[in-house]
């Protein structure tokens, strides 16, 4: 009977198709943990920029991590990054679709208010921070806020291309793999995203 | 000129994004741990269920076990509670071990 050092290693065997050996499983489990630890904050930030809501962003990131671990842990580590961002982006899109359906459904209900941005404003967002604001950080906060709003206004594919290429530093081939499209499409989406952002943000950027 | 502006936009947005990631005041260490703890939780739940079924089976009913333990305890208490002759009682128990052994073999 096979024995394992940890429950985790045993579980990896149950959930992954035909792993090479016990040593290999332990190795890629360790590598996967390191990989996820490296990208979790950036992935969360990207999801938060797309979804606005931090709780939803956490859910989507966690789901993506679980799916990557369960389905693709045995893949070569070089493929994890584009795979992870593809799963993450699918999760973001699913959530946005659900929100859209919910919004349509809610608009049929009597007494439902129009929400031009499609998202309810949290009243706490408007509460002033008690700590004195440092001008530099205030400018940074304002700039990132403007960037987030502009990114959310982009079509999903353009936002995705821009985020992966510019924030994550992926090359065209990796971005194409993550987006599930051709390299030519990536270039087109990226170029359009940059132009759209330039128009929205102005030349001061 | 346009290329330069675009390049500046790309650089600035990247710097802002990196800055906002670095300034996040909380870590997310539990995210992946949740995935690694899931199977452990499953195994633990199975173990708890197994124990529950074991004690819940007719052969190992907790009530019966409790009654047996209580009976043994009462026997010991009777032997030990003969205040005046407690030493004798223990000695008697020691002497009779051979008898009990014989009786056990005869019955078995």
Image: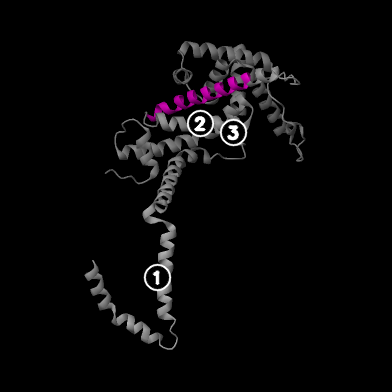
Category of crowding for the residue at label 3, using alpha-carbon neighbours closer than 10 angstroms: few (below 14), some (14–19), many (at least 20): some
Q: Which mark is residue B72?
A: 1
Residue B29 x/y as whole percent: 52, 41
Image quadrant containing the C terminus of chain A: top right
Question: Do the residues marked 1 and 3 share a common chain?
Answer: yes
Position of residue A141 measured from the top left corner of the image (x, y, whole percent): 69, 30
Q: Secondary structure at mark 2?
A: helix
Q: Which residue position is annotated with label 3?
A: B21
Give the quarter of the image for residue B43. top left
Tags 1 and 2 touching, CB below 8 Å: no
Foreground: A44 or A170? A44
Instruction: Check if residue A21 falls in the magenta segment.
Output: no
Residue at screen point 43% across, 33% down = A69
Residue A146, picture quadrant: top right
Q: Position of residue B87 (x, y in %)?
A: 38, 86
Query: Residue A63 bears which disc, if any?
Result: 2
Q: From the image, state whether disc 2 or disc 3 is nearer to you.
A: 2
Mark 1 against mark 2, which lies toward the viewer? 1
> Circle 3 sits in a helix, a strand or a loop, which is it?
helix
Q: Nearer the viewer, residue A24 or A6?
A: A6
Q: Report the quarter where the N terminus of chain A lies.
A: top left
Q: Is residue B19 visible?
A: no
Answer few, some or many: residues within 10 Å of disc 1's Cα (few below 14, many 20 plus, some between 14 and 19).
few
Circle 1 marks a residue in which chain? B
Q: CA distance from mark 1 to mark 2?
A: 55 Å
**Which one is closest to the eye, mark 1 or mark 3?**
1
Q: Residues within 10 Å of mark 2 (few under 14, many from 20)?
A: some
Q: Which residues are magenta?
A: A76-101
Query: What's the chain of the residue with tag 2?
Result: A
């Amino acid at each position: 009977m096979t024995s394992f050092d940890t429950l985790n290693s045993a579980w990896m065997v149950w959930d992954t198709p035909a792993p090479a050996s016990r040593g290999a499983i332990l190795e890629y489990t360790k590598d996967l943990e390191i990989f996820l630890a490296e990208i979790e904050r950036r992935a969360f930030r990207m999801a938060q920029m797309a979804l606005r809501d931090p709780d939803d962003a956490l859910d989507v990131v966690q789901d993506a991590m679980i799916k990557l671990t369960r389905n693709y842990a045995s893949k070569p580590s070089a493929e994890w990054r584009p795979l992870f961002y593809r799963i993450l982006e699918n999760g973001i899109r699913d959530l946005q679709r659900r929100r859209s359906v919910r919004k349509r459904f809610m608009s049929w209900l009597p007494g439902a208010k129009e929400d031009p941005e499609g998202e309810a404003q949290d009243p706490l967002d408007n509460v002033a921070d008690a700590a004195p604001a440092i001008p530099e950080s205030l400018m940074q906060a304002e700039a990132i806020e403007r960037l987030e709003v502009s990114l959310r206004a982009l079509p999903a594919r353009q936002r995705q291309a821009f985020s992966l290429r510019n924030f994550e530093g992926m090359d065209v081939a990796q971005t194409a793999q993550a987006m599930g499209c051709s390299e030519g499409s990536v270039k087109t989406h990226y170029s359009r995203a940059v132009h759209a952002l330039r128009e929205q943000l102005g030349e001061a950027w | 000129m346009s290329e330069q502006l675009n390049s500046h936009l790309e650089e600035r947005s990247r710097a802002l994004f990196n800055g906002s990631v670095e300034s996040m005041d909380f870590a997310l260490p539990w995210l992946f741990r949740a995935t690694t703890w899931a199977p452990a939780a499953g195994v633990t739940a199975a173990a708890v269920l197994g124990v529950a079924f074991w004690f819940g089976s007719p052969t190992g009913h907790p009530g019966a076990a409790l009654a047996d333990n209580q009976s043994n305890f009462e026997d010991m208490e009777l032997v030990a509670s003969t205040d005046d002759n407690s030493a004798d009682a223990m000695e008697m128990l020691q002497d009779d071990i051979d008898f009990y052994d014989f009786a056990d073999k005869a019955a078995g």
